[in-house]
Image: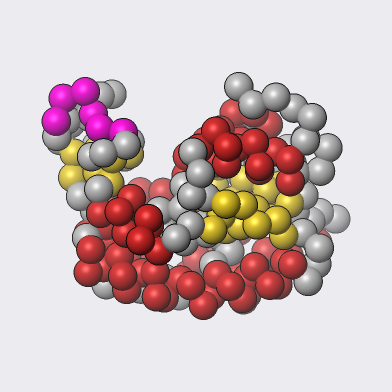
Amino acid sequence: MILILLGPPGAGKGTQARVLSERFGVPVISTGEILRAAARKGTPFGIQAKTYTDRGELVPDDLIISVVLDRLNETDCAKGFLLDGFPRTVQQARALDRSLADHGLRPDAVLHLVVDREELVRRLSGRRVCSRCGESYHLVSRPPRQPGVCDLDGAPLIQRDDDKPETIRQRLMVSETDTARVAQYYADQGLLSTIDGNVPPEQVTAAMLAAIPGKAEEPVS
């Protein structure tokens, strides 16, 4: 099972990725998590990538392609994977297609989450993440049990630099054009399904399952 989730920051890709990962038993490959882990470790790649994300800019294609394709060669991806946040450009999509074709593979489905811009700003500006484990919360829709503290490990919650309102607007502007091009790239291959991300998460999951070949009949837990 190879699935790709497309959509702007704050569309709910991470939430849906976790649900689909558990359902199909495949790992989530999140470029955001890869980048943040590298930044926390202070690797040369992580430091370089953070200079882009802190400005609300996309990390250059060549850096992202190399890191993601290396990750897909690890053993836990042997039976499939779910991509969250990759590909973000047509160049990345073509590189992924070439890599998959080398193994006789192609995506089973590409699910494009579409959300109103005002809703995206609301979601992102209210998001807080654990400074230690990275667990995500929202001040309105998913607050922690104790304000400012992670439910899982008690570490302080922080607002990521790329979740501040001025950076959010820049991120959305940068991502919209590229996402539209990637969506069209997969639409031309007959792989794209557009999913309304404005509705409650359970409805989004049901719509995604209905769009995956052979999975429409499965109930949503």
Q: Magenta segment range?
A: 142-147
- The image quarter containing residue 157 is top left
Q: Nearer the viewer, residue 83 or 193?
A: 193
Position of residue 31 measured from the top left corner of the image (x, y, whole percent): 47, 55
Q: Residue at x 85, y 55 (%)?
A: 104
Quadrant in the picture for the C terminus:
top right
Up the image or down, 214 lies above or below 103; here it is above
Image quadrant assignment for residue 185: bottom right
Left or right of 214 on screen, residue 166: left
User: What residue do we see at 58% from left, 37% from top?
Assistant: 203
Quick check: can you spot residue 116? yes
Q: Position of residue 175 (x, y in %)?
A: 46, 71
Which residue occupies 58% across, 73% down? 180
In this rendering, the answer to whether 1 lies above or below 44 is: above
Give percent across and percent down for residue 20: 61, 35
Q: Look at 61% across and 57% down and name the residue there.
A: 112
Image position of 167 (left or right of 200): left
Mainly helix, strand or loop, the magenta region? loop
Q: Position of residue 179 (x, y in %)?
A: 55, 70
Q: How many marks?
A: 0
Residue 106 quadrant: bottom right
Q: Nearer the viewer, residue 216 or 66?
A: 216
* Position of the N terminus by quadrant: top right
Q: Is residue 32 left or right of residue 206?
A: left
